Image (tube, rainbow, N blue to C red):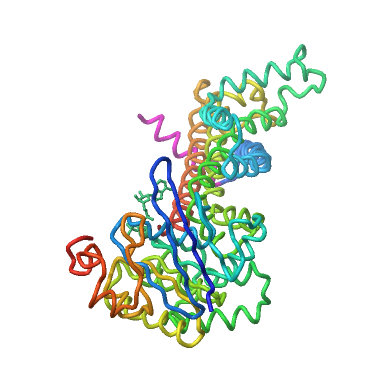
């Protein structure tokens, strides 16, 4: 079953098309990864999916709803079914606990439930001990894990991840990969992840889309993309000749 | 040289014995500047937040105006308030000239733009990243504004303290509109001017030390707030 459908999507900044004629479908429970070099348009695509920005042309259909026809209020409710971890996440200037609790608080969840859920998700990312720390005193890896916990706690139907492990050490990378893989498997959360690390895509994804200068060059299962790429540009990217 | 050392001795005596005149002058300064800053916050914090949050036509003009007002010379503000409150001025009937209230009005005019300006800068600089995070987590418009304001609370507090530091050490405005009347409108700074001129160095030094102590406390508070206000990007 499809949860996300993108049809003929275009995004233009001033005079330049950053995304051109993007077409893809993501199934419920799928782990979908977008790979591509710097400036390919990965972040732009994720922001459009999360309704943080509007497309220049084309459609994004979320669970059968055409989001381009939605009012701002309707968008808030659609957005509440998703969660995004930004490429450079920002934590609120308060405790780790309050950061993670944010999404639940604004949804009006009661205190007791918030406490239970926040502590559980902090345990999942291995930060339960730091619940009362000021977020400003965390290391980069810890901050990234708090941002992930903050997204996971609202139990989104679709989890959007923008380079969730860029700039992290192997240990933090391993923890984060384990958590998102687990969430995808156990909770059946749909994941759309952008990364320029093709090995990470290969490790995690059910399907990979190769995005290159605003266009999707090809979409396929990891083994297809890696062993028999159809396009010479995909092949070049996999061989590390373009990045 | 001896005179100066003696002055310091007497100054400490005056402070430690809680000399009634020193106490009266200090309390008046605190009361006038404190009230001016509280009123300035009531006006400045919401205006700064609105200016930081919303774009509108002519905003740049308003922003420039606020920034200019932030550096307003106290003497000019004193003159302006004096003209407003003097017998023949538009508010002359209120008979406020040479009262503590007149001093509060003048310092309010000095404090408000500072609080507005610092709040505005903090809110608009924090805006983009925090705003998007809140929106992506499902915040409504109201929740978004609340979140942004909560994020800037440390900067707002800094703005209030900076404003207080500026008005408590200002002479020009309160000298003109307060008149430096003994036991009534004589404040730390205006008293120092007068006592120095009269050669009463002990009293001048005592008041100077109190002013420096206040400035020191203010700086400590600012440093503490800046540390707490640090952010991750
Ligand atoms: N708000 C914007 N205004 C103008 N141009 C933009 C804007 N956002 C992105 N771009 C441009 O769009 C192109 C794609 O940017 P995007 O951030 O989506 O790439 P990316 O694939 O995420 O890259 P990276 O791997 O470096 O994160 C870039 O050329 C970028 O300069
Ligand atoms: Mg990016």
Q: Give the range drawn in magenta.
A: B1-16
Would residue B26 be found to the left or right of residue A150 on screen?
A: right
Relative image position of residue B110 (x, y in whole percent) = 59, 31
- Residue closest to the eye, A179 or B197: A179
The residue positioned 34% from the left and 78% from the top of the image is A221
- Residue closest to the eye, A56 or A181: A56
**Residue farthest along the top direction in this orientation:** B88
Would residue A185 be found to the left or right of residue A157 on screen?
A: left
Would residue B15 be counted in the magenta stretch? yes
Q: Can residue B229 be seen in this view?
A: yes
Relative image position of residue A169 (x, y in whole percent) = 27, 73
Image quarter of residue A215 = bottom left
Locate the C terminus of chain A and report the quarter of the image it occupies: bottom left
- Residue closest to the eye, A214 or A154: A214
Relative image position of residue B206 (x, y in whole percent) = 51, 37
Would residue B83 be counted in the magenta stretch? no
Look at the magenta stretch and give its main secondary structure.
Answer: helix
Relative image position of residue A132 (x, y in whole percent) = 50, 74
């Amino acid at each position: 079953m499809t949860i996300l459908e993108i049809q003929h999507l275009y995004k233009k900044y001033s005079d330049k098309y950053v995304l051109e004629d993007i077409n893809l479908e993501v199934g419920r429970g799928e782990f979908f990864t977008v790979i591509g070099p710097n400036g390919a348009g990965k972040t732009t695509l994720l922001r459009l999916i999360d309704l943080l920005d509007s497309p220049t042309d084309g459609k994004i259909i979320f669970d059968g709803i055409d989001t381009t026809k939605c009012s701002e209020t309707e968008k808030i409710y659609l957005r509440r079914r998703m969660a995004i971890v930004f490429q450079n996440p920002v934590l609120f200037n308060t405790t780790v606990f309050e950061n993670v609790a944010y999404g639940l608080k604004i949804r009006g969840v009661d205190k007791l439930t918030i406490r239970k859920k926040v502590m559980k998700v902090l345990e999942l990312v291995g930060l339960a001990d730091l619940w009362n720390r000021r977020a400003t005193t965390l290391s980069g890896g810890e901050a990234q894990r708090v941002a992930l916990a903050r997204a996971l706690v609202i139990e989104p139907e679709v989890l959007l991840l923008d380079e969730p492990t860029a700039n992290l050490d192997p240990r933090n990378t391993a923890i984060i990969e384990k958590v998102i893989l687990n969430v995808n498997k156990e909770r059946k959360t749909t994941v759309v992840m952008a990364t320029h690390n093709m090995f990470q895509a290969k490790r995690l994804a059910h399907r990979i889309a190769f995005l290159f200068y605003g266009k999707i060059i090809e979409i396929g299962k990891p083994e297809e993309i890696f062993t028999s790429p159809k396009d010479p540009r995909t092949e070049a990217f996999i061989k590390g000749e373009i990045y | 040289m001896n005179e100066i050392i003696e002055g310091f001795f007497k100054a400490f005596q005056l402070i430690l014995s809680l000399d009634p005149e020193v106490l009266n002058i200090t309390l008046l300064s605190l009361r006038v500047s404190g009230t001016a800053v509280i009123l300035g916050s009531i006006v400045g914090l919401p205006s700064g937040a609105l200016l930081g949050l919303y774009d509108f036509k002519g905003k740049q003009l308003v922003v420039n105006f606020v920034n200019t007002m932030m550096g307003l010379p106290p003497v000019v503000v004193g003159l302006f308030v004096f003209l407003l409150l003097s017998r023949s001025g538009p508010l002359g009937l209120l008979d406020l000239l040479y009262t503590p209230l007149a001093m509060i009005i003048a310092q309010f005019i000095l404090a408000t733009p500072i609080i507005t300006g610092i709040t505005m800068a903090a809110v608009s600089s924090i805006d983009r990243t925090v705003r998007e995070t809140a929106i992506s987590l499902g915040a409504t418009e109201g929740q978004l504004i609340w979140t942004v304001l909560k994020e800037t609370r440390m900067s707002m507090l800094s703005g209030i303290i900076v404003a207080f530091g500026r008005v408590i050490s200002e002479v020009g405005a309160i000298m003109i509109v307060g008149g430096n009347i003994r036991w009534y409108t004589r404040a730390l700074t205006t008293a120092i001017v007068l006592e120095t001129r009269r050669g009463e160095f002990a009293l001048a030094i005592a008041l100077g030390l109190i002013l420096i102590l206040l400035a020191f406390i203010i700086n400590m508070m600012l440093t503490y707030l800046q540390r707490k206000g640090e952010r991750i990007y």
